[in-house]
Amino acid sequence: MDGEPPADGTRKTVEWRSVQSETVSAPLVRRVPYLELKLEHPGLEPVGYGERFFPDAVPYELDGTPRVFYWRPALAPAADDSDAWQLVCVTTHELTGFDALPTEGPPLVTGEGDGTTLVVGGTIGGETTTRHVESYTAPPLSIDTCSDSEVKLTIAGAEYSVANDQRRRIRLDERRVEPSDGEGGPTTVTPELVVRYPGRRELHHPAPGETYRLFPSFGLDLDEMPNPLSVPTAADELDDEALAAQLGVDLSQQPYPERVLWQAFAYTAFDPHSDVTPALTQLESGHVVVRTATRDRS
């Protein structure tokens, strides 16, 4: 499976361990209604920058099935048994499943005790800009009903509906906040709740409570993969496209979002600058699981 060396001719050896698939908890794979919520505060000056090299959530369609693939854990700690979920809701910071409707919505902000972290702008499962304020009470939110065609919510006492595959930006009442850094003093902001309802999606996520990284099969056969692996590099960094060609993975035949997952896999498992030996296994479902001791490519 060793292909031609990359343009600069440089390769680095990476060792990896194989683990028995029976020792890995099966990932969560469920086809459920999927709702996106993000509470933004565009009038604030951002101070924090939650940058991610790869997004946690990668939505795409494969063989006619729309899916959302979470390659690293994002589930809220108190998530209930996924077999009973009627709806999955994701915010800028976590994923939550609900087994009954109507229900109180998920937390829209983070932090307690020493203040609250507000999102200035952000993407679901991706990068965010934030500002920490002294105190803040998020608007009350309930998710009332959902069907394949729409979801209905009540926000700050007002009812709203969002149709399948539609996005709605809801301006809420303005309020005064005081940034924790003390710069600029109290200021007025107008929160905006962005609601998007992609509808029913096939959700892929690491098993609840697990910390492993989860990936599609990419057509890989780990039994045929050399160990140690001669990893191609360019400019002293992993060349993920050359690695794909070396391992027989035809990226041109993959949906573009799955190529992002390939990059995340390649850097998680075979970054030549890491001193962690990755543990890999392939499940009966075809999913590839990577366990590392300390690596996090956020």
Image: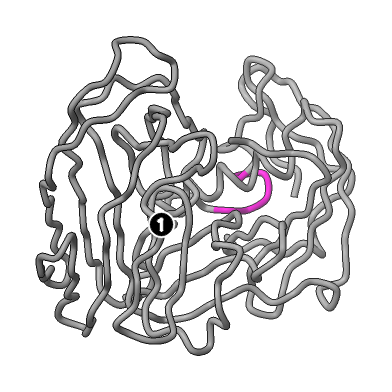
**How many discs mark residues in the rendered view?**
1
Disc 1 residue type?
Answer: Pro
User: Does the stretch in magenta take in 74?
Assistant: no
Q: In this image, 52 relative to 129: left or right?
A: right
| Quadrant in which the C terminus is drawn | top right
Q: Residue at x 79, y 71 (%)?
A: 24
Hey, which quadrant is residue 151 in on the image?
A: bottom left
Seen in the picture, residue 50 relative to 75 is either above or below; the reply is: above
Camera-side residue: 64 or 173? Answer: 173
Q: Residue at x 60, y 57 (%)?
A: 73
Q: Residue at x 35, y 37 (%)?
A: 119
Seen in the picture, residue 63 relative to 289 is either above or below; the reply is: below
Which region is colored magenta? 244-249
Camera-side residue: 140 or 65? Answer: 140
User: Does the stretch in magenta take in 247?
Assistant: yes
| Residue 245, image x, y percentages | 60, 44
| Residue 176, image x, y percentages | 22, 31
Q: In this image, 280 relative to 78: left or right?
A: right
Seen in the picture, residue 81 relative to 254 is either above or below; the reply is: below
| Residue 136, image x, y percentages | 35, 41
Seen in the picture, residue 46 relative to 224 is either above or below; the reply is: above
Q: Which residue is mark 1?
A: 107
As helix, strand or loop, the secondary structure at mark 1 comes to: loop
| Residue 203, image x, y percentages | 46, 71
Hey, which quadrant is residue 287 in on the image?
A: bottom right
Hey, which quadrant is residue 157 in on the image?
A: bottom left
Q: Residue at x 75, y 43 (%)?
A: 2
